[in-house]
Image (cartoon, rainbow, N blue to C red):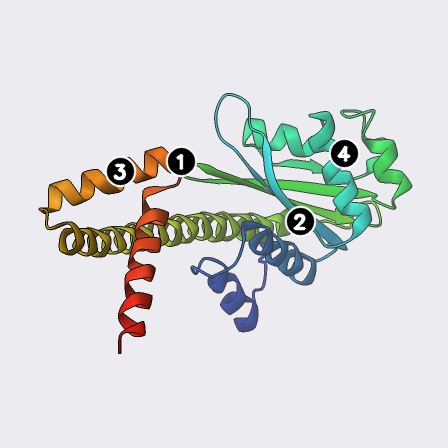
């Protein structure tokens, strides 16, 4: 009989929510992936997730883990630039180790994993546009992770990649909106300052703006800061005459 991973309605809802745009950082999104993997994947005692840059050589950007020992194993690979997580990210190919004690592919990494109680692990990887996310699941006994259940890990990595990508898009959109608002506010305060100078000097708008620039350059102060001072001074003077 074919093996099928069972996904509860609660888990399905939480997985779906991973891809929604949230006011959260990429690290928070990665942490959610690791927590879901630990709860949902049979034999998974803990997990780590890493967001990578894309290009000729993938580099780690953000990471999260469910336990300090596992976070260390992820971090040491990122520092050394070698290990199963790095290989998975660069080749964009899943990696599976059924028994860490018998593993020979990463002689510098496996002793560190064994010292921290890791007896098996699996790396899944998913690319969403310019974002690569790796999810590593760890077991505490040999064979604890079943290859047939790793499709759920792949699903979490895919949704996690979407979550991280959406978070980045949200951050970019929020940053752009903030910059636009600041630009509008700056333009408004400069226009007000020009009006004050036009009234005080009896000049046109171009002359008033040229005077603002002259003061800014002479005093080595930003144009908007000079404009703010002029407007604030005008308001204070007006209030004092009431």
Among numbered discs 4 and 1, the one appearing first in the sequence: 4
Q: Give residue 231's quadrant in the image.
A: bottom left
Task: Return the mark for residue 213.
Answer: 3
Labels 4 & 1 near each other (Cβ < 8 A): no
Distance between mark 4 and mark 3 Cα atoms: 53 Å
Distance between mark 2 and mark 4 Cα atoms: 13 Å
Among numbered discs 2 and 4, the one appearing first in the sequence: 2
Residue pictured at 49% horizontal, 30% vertical: 54
On-image quarter of the N terminus: bottom right
For the residue labelled by badge 1, is the local secondary structure a helix, a strand or a loop? loop
Residue pictured at 75% horizontal, 55% vertical: 43
- Residue 136 x %, y %: 67, 44
* Residue named by callout 1: 220
Among numbered discs 3 and 1, the one appearing first in the sequence: 3
- Residue 230 x %, y %: 30, 54
* Residue named by callout 4: 76
Among numbered discs 4 and 3, the one appearing first in the sequence: 4
């Amino acid at each position: 009989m074919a093996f099928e991973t069972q996904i509860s309605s609660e888990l399905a809802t939480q997985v779906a929510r991973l891809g929604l745009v949230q006011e959260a950082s990429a690290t928070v999104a990665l942490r959610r992936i690791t927590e879901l993997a630990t709860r949902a994947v049979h034999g998974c005692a803990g997990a780590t997730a890493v967001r990578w840059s894309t290009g000729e050589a993938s580099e780690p950007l953000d990471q999260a883990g469910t336990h300090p020992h596992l976070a260390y194993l992820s971090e040491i690979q990122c520092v050394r630039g070698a290990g199963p997580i790095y290989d998975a990210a660069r080749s964009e190919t899943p990696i599976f180790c059924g028994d860490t004690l018998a593993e020979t592919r990463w002689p510098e990494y496996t002793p560190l994993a064994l010292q921290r109680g890791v007896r098996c692990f699996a790396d899944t990887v998913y690319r969403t546009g310019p974002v690569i996310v790796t999810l590593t699941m760890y077991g505490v006994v040999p064979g604890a992770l079943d290859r047939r259940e790793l499709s759920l890990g792949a699903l979490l990595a895919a949704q996690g990649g979407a979550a991280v990508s959406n978070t980045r898009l949200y951050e970019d959109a929020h940053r752009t909106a903030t910059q636009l608002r600041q630009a509008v506010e700056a333009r408004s305060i400069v226009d007000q300052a020009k009006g004050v100078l036009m009234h005080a000097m009896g000049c046109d708008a171009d002359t008033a703006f040229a005077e603002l620039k002259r003061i800014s350059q002479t005093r080595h102060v930003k144009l908007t800061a000079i404009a703010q001072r002029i407007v604030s001074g005008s308001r204070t003077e007006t209030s004092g005459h009431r």
